[in-house]
Amino acid sequence: MAASVEEFLQTLPAMTHELSEALTAISAYLAGSRHLFGLDGRLDRIRGALEQANSQAERANDAVRRLRENLGKLGGS
């Protein structure tokens, strides 16, 4: 059991990196979309939804960053 936990813990840095990269890309695409929608003032509702999605992607990215920092502390990095 301890070996499988250790193996899992070894995969966490790679997993958090993958999540962070994806969430960063999502944030970038959403920010670009908000800009494009901003060129046409009739789309306020869509703009608001994109802003909320972007906020949540940034929140998840921050959580992954904190997880990575904590993993580094556990590993003595």
Image (spheres, rainbow, N blue to C red):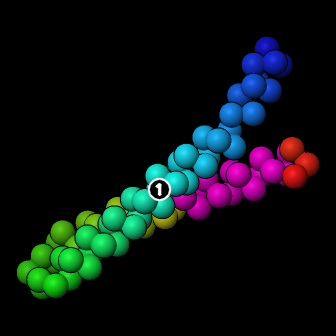
Residue shown at the point (71%, 28%) measured from the top left: 8
Residue shown at the point (30%, 73%) measured from the top left: 32
Tell me which corner region of the image, top left, top right, bottom left or bottom right, holds residue 54. bottom left
Q: Is residue 3 left or right of residue 65?
A: right
**Relative to 4, is 39 above or below?**
below
Residue shown at the point (65%, 58%) measured from the top left: 65
Q: Residues within 10 Å of mark 1 (few under 14, many from 20)?
A: many
Residue shown at the point (39%, 59%) measured from the top left: 26
Q: Is residue 44 left or right of residue 42?
A: right
Q: Is residue 65 left or right of residue 32?
A: right
Residue 64 located within the stretch drawn in magenta: yes
Q: Nearer the viewer, residue 60 or 28?
A: 28
**Relative to 48, is 11 above or below?**
above
Q: Locate residue 40, reporting x and y percent.
A: 11, 83
Q: Amino acid at mark 1?
A: Leu
Q: Locate residue 33, reporting x and y percent.
A: 26, 70
Q: Is residue 7 left or right of residue 27?
A: right
Is any part of residue 57 visible from this angle?
no
Q: Quadrant of the N terminus?
A: top right
Residue 67 located within the stretch drawn in magenta: yes
**Relative to 51, is 8 above or below?**
above
* Magenta-drawn stretch, dominant element (helix, strand or loop): helix
Q: Secondary structure at mark 1?
A: helix
- Residue segment shown in magenta: 60-74
The number of numbered badges drawn on the structure is 1
Q: Residue lying farthest right?
A: 76
Q: Residue lying farthest left?
A: 42
Q: Locate residue 23, reporting x and y percent.
A: 47, 56
Is any part of residue 5 visible from this angle?
yes
- The residue labelled by disc 1 is 23
Q: Residue lying farthest top?
A: 1
